[in-house]
Image: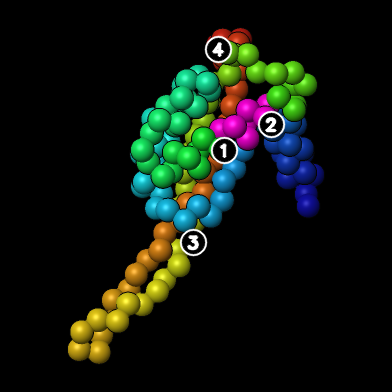
Amino acid sequence: MGVRKRQAAQALKEAKKNVAFAKLTDVPSSPRKMRLVADLVRGQEVFRALGILKFSNKEAAARLEKLLRSAIANWEAKNERKAENGELYISTIYVNPAPMLKRLRPAPQGRGYRIRKRANHVTLVVDTIDNDVKKD
């Protein structure tokens, strides 16, 4: 590894040290369905987002709720204190497609229809509301 590449990797590693995030990989639902729920909570305060996810009818909401609780726990572990109400918010949430499973379904006259079983990866970043004000 070259010097510039190593320095860039070190800088990225240092920047990630004070960011609390959680990742959910290979969720067996389509990215489009997950994005509908992710858009509901993007930019929300975390405890309000937990309420939104708890009472949502979507299946993806239960998975995102668990992921959000994990991100909050990660923040609490890094800062060695409990999160207070109104302190944290979801700064970034994005859904990427995962590799598709391709299957064949028998069809009439000896043909086969292709079925694409989609999956996704979700990344959720939690930050304090005070940090956002200090950066501006």
The residue carrying mark 3 is 99
Say if mark 1 contacts mark 4, CB within 8 Å: no
As drawn, the label of residue 86 is 4
Q: Earlier in the sequence, mark 3 or mark 4?
A: 4
Amino acid beneath label 2: Asn
- Tell me the element at label 2: helix
Distance from Cα at disc 1 to Cα at disc 4? 19 Å
As drawn, the label of residue 85 is none
Q: Earlier in the sequence, mark 1 or mark 4?
A: 1
Q: Residue at x 58, y 13 (%)?
A: 85
- Tell me the element at label 1: helix
Q: Quadrant of residue 53?
A: top left
The residue carrying mark 2 is 74
Amino acid beneath label 4: Gly
Q: Is 92 or 62 nearer to us in this picture?
A: 62
Distance from Cα at disc 2 to Cα at disc 1? 11 Å
> Is residue 58 found inside the magenta-colored segment of the image?
no
Question: Badge 4, how many Cα within 10 Å: few under 14, some, many 20+?
Answer: few
Q: Position of residue 117 (x, y in %)?
A: 40, 63
Q: Is 28 or 128 nearer to us in this picture?
A: 28
Distance from Cα at disc 3 to Cα at disc 4? 37 Å
Residues rendered magenta in the picture: 68-75
Distance from Cα at disc 2 to Cα at disc 4? 17 Å
Say if mark 1 contacts mark 3, CB within 8 Å: no
Question: Badge 2, how many Cα within 10 Å: few under 14, some, many 20+?
Answer: some
The residue carrying mark 1 is 67
Question: Badge 1, how many Cα within 10 Å: few under 14, some, many 20+?
Answer: some
- Tell me the element at label 4: loop
Q: Earlier in the sequence, mark 2 or mark 3?
A: 2
